Image (tube, rainbow, N blue to C red):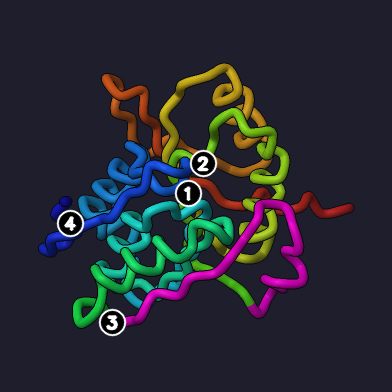
């Protein structure tokens, strides 16, 4: 059980899959959002979470006033939906939405731009050695593109070499700043926006 935004949050975890556990990045980013509401004001903002897992981060964004779409792989959605509804019903301004999203697949079909435009894209502990890192980066780029004014907030705990190489790709793809660091957890939170295309003068 967690307490954020003045509410107790109870999460049902399942041991079957990665996505059904609460990862430290979700807790760290939830704390960051709660503590930095001046910098990151989610009230009435459209927010998309990539790899929402158990839904903790999406729940917190909801409780902070955002209109949230939580996404993950199809087999994770029933537990995600259960947690979201249980913890936001009667407590949040908007009912959270849940959608299936496999990184890098059918993005233009399922989330065509600009009809699907988000103020913030959240991602917590989405980088682990799973061979989908190119797809993850492509997905981040799809939602956070030049001219879109979307801000990406990504929390990552460094565990493997692949984390470091992903950070390099991430930093060369986006204008990014490190906004928080929790050294004893090797946790970093980055804020990023699309690099604007250079004009062809």
For marks 3 and 2, give the one nearer the viewer.
2
For marks 1 and 2, give the one nearer the viewer.
2
Whether residue 98 is in magenta: the answer is: yes
Q: Do tag 1 and tag 2 residues touch (Cβ < 8 Å)? A: yes
**Distance between mark 4 and mark 3 Cα atoms:** 16 Å
Q: Which mark is residue 4?
A: 4
Dominant secondary structure of the magenta stretch? loop
Q: Which residues are magenta?
A: 94-115
Q: Do tag 3 and tag 2 residues touch (Cβ < 8 Å)? A: no
First in sequence, mark 3 or 2: give its number. Answer: 3
Q: Residues within 10 Å of mark 1 (few under 14, many from 20)?
A: many
Residue 182, how many percent across, how many down? 29, 28
Q: Which residue is mark 3?
A: 93
First in sequence, mark 4 or 2: give its number. Answer: 4
Residue 90, how many percent across, how many down? 20, 82
**Distance between mark 1 and mark 2 Cα atoms:** 6 Å
Q: In the image, is residue 159 above or below residue 45?
A: above
**Distance between mark 4 and mark 2 Cα atoms:** 22 Å
């Amino acid at each position: 059980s967690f307490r954020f935004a003045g509410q107790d949050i109870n999460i049902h975890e399942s041991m079957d899959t990665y996505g059904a556990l609460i990862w430290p990045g979700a807790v760290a980013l939830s704390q960051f959002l709660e503590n930095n509401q001046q910098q990151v004001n989610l009230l009435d903002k459209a927010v998309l979470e990539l790899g929402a897992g158990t839904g903790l981060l999406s729940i917190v964004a909801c409780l902070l006033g955002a209109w949230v779409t939580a996404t993950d792989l199809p087999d994770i959605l029933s537990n995600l939906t259960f947690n979201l509804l249980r913890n936001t019903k009667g407590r949040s301004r908007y009912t959270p939405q849940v959608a299936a999203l496999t990184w890098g697949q059918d993005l233009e079909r399922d989330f065509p731009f600009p009809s699907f435009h988000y103020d913030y894209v959240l991602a917590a502990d989405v980088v682990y050695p799973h061979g989908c890192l190119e797809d993850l980066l492509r997905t981040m780029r799809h939602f956070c593109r030049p001219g879109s004014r979307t801000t990406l907030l990504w929390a990552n705990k460094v565990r493997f070499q692949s984390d470091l190489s992903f950070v390099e790709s991430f930093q060369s793809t986006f204008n990014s700043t490190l906004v928080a660091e929790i050294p004893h957890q090797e946790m970093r939170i980055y804020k990023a926006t699309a690099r604007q295309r250079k004009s062809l003068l």
